Amino acid sequence: MKRFVTVALVFMLVVGLTLTAGAQVTIRHWDWHQPRMNLKQKYMAEYEKLNPDVKFETQIIAWDDYWTRLMSGVAGGDVPDIAQFHNSQTQAFLAHLEAFPADLFDYEQYKADIINFEAAYLFDGTFHFYPVGIMTGLIFYNADYWAEAGLTEADIPRTWDEFRELAKKLTKYDANGDIQVAGFVPNNILGVFWLDLHYQLGGKLYGEGAQTVDWNNEAGRKALEFIETLIFEDRVTEPGFLSFTEAMGTGHAAMVYSWSWLGGELNNNYPDLNWSVFRLPTFDGKLAPGPIARNNHETGMAVMKSARPEAKDAAFRFLKWLYEETDYLVEVNLILGTAPSNRNLLDDPRIVSHPLISAVAEQVPYTNIPGEIPYEVESSYGLGMLQDLLFFGYSAAEALELAEAEANNVLKERPVKWYVEDLYVPVAE
């Protein structure tokens, strides 16, 4: 009898240990951005303490290799359970991402709280990567040059006419009339800057159904003629001048246009530069009804459809905790130079007190997301052509006609499937 009891106890102990061991879940995660991963690891360590049955394995993979590795993993069955995602890869990976379960994530609340949620994240009624941040184009300026010119925050321009006069005032020439400090540098980002002006004047990126682009119109020509005036009439910059990043970083620009990622580059590469930002001026000085610029979203993590079944539920529960019960969203936006997508976080003191992100936060409610933009349309065969054509002496109409034709050739080869530009709802200021 004692032997039976002993055997039974041993059996129960072994079974209990087996069940306990089986309950352990290891969640694998990939990212390409080390500072963001460092922040995640801090929260992962906290989550492991709260949930001893969950462990994390993380890996950094360089951007150039990341998507190839992820797609190879999909084909070969070796994927992370949670993958950092980027919306530029939506068409390629959407079918391989698990939908966020509606019984765990409140879709209706997200529609109310998250900027562009339905346009930027919902596909067939579900979302597959979490909304984190949002960025857009801003004006960066050299605060030292600003002070030398006797300017203060009260002089921040609200109209492009005011901006034009400011750019002329801030331009410095040498004795030969050569530009030493450009008042405003759109060089190497001119086409992207033009698109924001085009939006302000009522234009759009795409024509109907995104089968073509729609650039060579009255709004497009007026927007490009404004840039042409800055360059050739006002001479606040010139063809062949430094790129906007180098000009700003080396002190050869008083103002540049850039998306908010430039803040991180300036801090990393030019730590002694005294810079600040302000939102884009508009032609009439008003934000509403918008859009006054394009935006794009910094997406969060996604759970892979081919992830191990035992890890999927644990992965979603971790993401629910991370994104909704901690300060992660505020902290990661501070790292990325983006404004939180969730409107409820825009008045967080850490966001409000951050000059770059507060400028993004002020502007993004009045911006639009068009959907996918093929790389060629945004660079060499589309918007990227406008600068070269303008610098080579083409008129605004001629430049737009040629760039539009090249972009349309790209769209014939690579049709856009994710198109949400027409979903923009005008905002009351």
Image (tube, grey):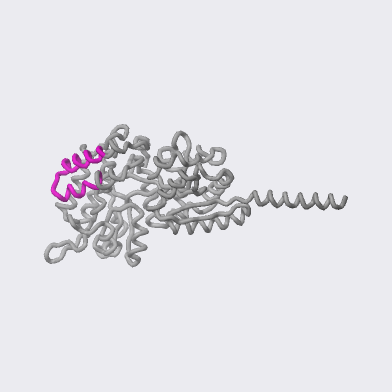
> Above or below — where is 84 with respect to 420?
below
Which residue extends farthest right? 1
- Point 18% across, 43% down: residue: 399
Q: In which quarter of the view is residue 56 placed?
A: bottom right
Q: Is residue 105 left or right of residue 144?
A: right
Residue 65 image offset from top left, x and y in percent: 40, 52
Would residue 402 appear left or right of 20 to someone viewing this image?
Answer: left
* Residue range highlighted in magenta: 382-409
Number of marks present in the image shown: 0
Residue 417 higher or lower than 174, as above or below: above
Of 67 and 201, nearer the camera is 67
Residue 162 percent coordinates (x, y): 24, 51
Q: Position of residue 343 (x, y in %)?
A: 45, 46
Residue furthest left as drawn: 176
Mark yes or no: residue 283 visible. no
Q: Give the dominant element type of the magenta stretch: helix, strand or loop.
A: helix
Residue 130 screen position, x and y as percent = 47, 45
6 or 97: nearer the eye?
A: 6
Image point 24% across, 55% down: which residue? 185
Residue 273 versus residue 52: which sits nearer the camera?
52
Q: Is residue 127 visible?
A: yes
Q: Left or right: where does residue 175 sit relative to residue 345? A: left
